[in-house]
Image (cartoon, rainbow, N blue to C red):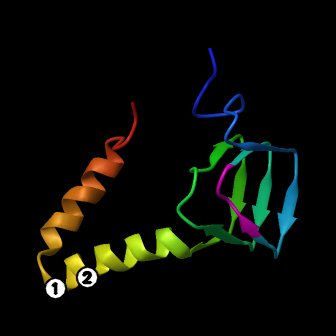
Amino acid sequence: MTNRNGRDDPERTEVLDQHFTGERVVLDGKHFEDCMFENCDLVYRGGVPPNFIRSDFAAPRFVFEDAAQSTVQFMSAIYNGIDERIIEKTFDEIRAGFGDG
């Protein structure tokens, strides 16, 4: 059976044993294994979520663009304009494994 969350997922491109330094790395649709990210801009645009196995991060900066940026802006608007408890509850669900399954 195909593992839809990792290496055997046909929607992900495999990136193995790479060292990225000071680069802009687009994460969507990638499976990173045994990689190092050092002082990189890690860009997520809202596509197929990336997967990381045995990868290390040193001073990463996450950048959200396109659909991902719209989601962050929407959550910020809720937090700052409607009720911050809604977003805090969402983060509690994320910490508990929201979306797993």
Which residue is at 67% across, 59% downward? 27
The residue identified by callout 2 is 77
Q: Is residue 4 left or right of residue 84?
A: right
Quarter holding the N terminus is top right
Q: Are marks 2 and 1 in contact (CB under 8 Å)?
A: yes
State whether residue 56 is above or below residue 83. above
Which quarter of the rendered picture does the C terminus lie within?
top left
Residue 28: in magenta span: yes
The residue positioned 48% from the left and 68% from the top of the image is: 68
Q: Is residue 85 magenta?
A: no
Which residue carries the number 1 mark? 81
Residue nearest the observer in this picture, 74 or 92: 74
| Residue density around tag 2, few if under 14, some if 14–19, many if 20 or more, within 10 Å | some
Taking 57 as reference, is 97 left or right?
left
- Circle 2: element type: helix
Specify the segment rendered in magenta.
Answer: 25-29
Spot the residue most to the bottom. 81
Magenta-highlighted stretch: main secondary structure? loop
Q: For residue 64, which quarter of the picture?
A: bottom right
Q: Quadrant of residue 75?
A: bottom left
Q: Is residue 95 above or below residue 65?
A: above
